[in-house]
Image (cartoon, helix red, strand yellow):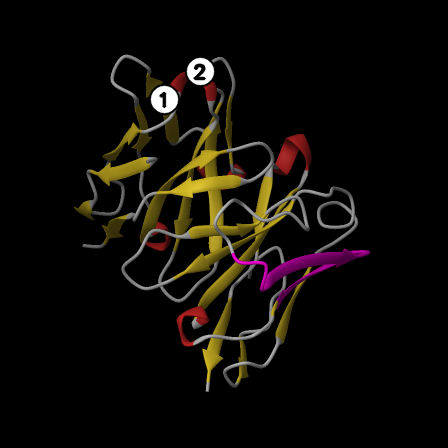
Amino acid sequence: EVQLVESGGGLVQPGGSLRLSCAASGFSFGSSWMNWVRQAPGKGLEWVAGIKPDGGEKYYVDSVEGRFTISTDNAKNSVYLQMNSLRVEETAVYYCVKDGGWCHDYWGQGALVTVAS
Amino acid sequence: QSALTQPRSVSASPGQSVTMSCTGTSSDVGAYNYVSWYQFHPGKAPKLIVYDVTKRPSGVPDRFSGSKSGNTASLTISGLQAEDEADYYCCSYAGRNIHWVFGGGTKLTVL
């Protein structure tokens, strides 16, 4: 059974940093693209970042480029999202998402990140 | 504002059918047959229910079906059941620069 479990969410002040972690199990971690997708309160979904299985390619939505970093640790079957210079409008539930082909076939339950003073 | 446009809500009675739309552009929905749909139930992990426009993952009932015409994709749920009440989001691949775009979600109410 595929499981994705996020951790590391919480309250952070504007301009602060937070690191999200996602522990994956139940599939060949090194063979799947992994992503982070977020949902702000009352809003739709937004793809934030994606990483190729070997970590060789990383992609970001324009609004987080230069501030967020996605990474993986294949030995720990984990994917991370380092978020710096956080903004109030980035308050959201952040989902860890596995790709299967050309879709996102498994999602975690999400981690809430609140950016507020 | 989300990249893909979905109706905020739809409703129907048990046993009936409902169709919800997902409108994009010629750069995303219209350009690729990589539209997928996701079901969000409160407190549960989101679930993939349709991918590659029309395909269903194993375990998803054939009451769920997807289609696409031009820049608009659609999800149809037939034989509605109470447990289908949820939020539904569409997603499309949008090329190597944008990657993935999502809709704003449609809340399905089973009356």
Where is A114 relative to B64, above or below? Answer: above
Task: Please check the rendered image and state whether residue A70 is part of the magenta-colored stretch, yes or no.
Answer: no
Under mark 2, the amino acid is Gly
Residue A86 falls left or right of residue A44: left
Left or right: residue B26 versus residue B41 is right
Kindly identify the residue that appears in the image at 41 percent across and 17 percent down. A30
Q: Secondary structure at mark 1?
A: strand
The quadrant in which residue B72 appears is bottom right
Residue under pointer 1: A71
Q: Is residue B40 visible?
A: yes
- Residue under label 2, please give it: A55
Closer-to-camera residue (A102/B98): A102
Expressed as whole percent of the image width and height from the top left, the position of residue A101 reads 58, 32
Q: Which mark is residue B6?
A: none
Which quarter of the figure has residue B62?
bottom right
Dots 1 and 2 on the same chain: yes
Rounded to the nearest angstrom, the CA distance separating label 1 from label 2 is: 7 Å
Q: How many marks?
A: 2
Task: Point out the image quarter for the C terminus of chain A.
Answer: bottom left
Q: Judge whether B105 appears above or below A47 on screen.
A: below
Name the image quarter holding residue B103. Answer: bottom right
Check disc 1: other Cα within 10 Å, few if <14, some if 14-19, many if 20+. Answer: many
Given the image, on which type of amino acid does mark 1 rest?
A: Ser
Q: Residue A61, image x and y in percent?
A: 52, 38
Range of the magenta residues? Answer: B61-76
Mark earlier in primary sequence (1, 2): 2
Residue A23: % across, % down: 26, 30
Q: Quick one: quadrant of the N terminus of chain A?
A: top left
Disc 2 residue crowd, few under 14, some 14–19, many 20+, Cα 10 Å: some
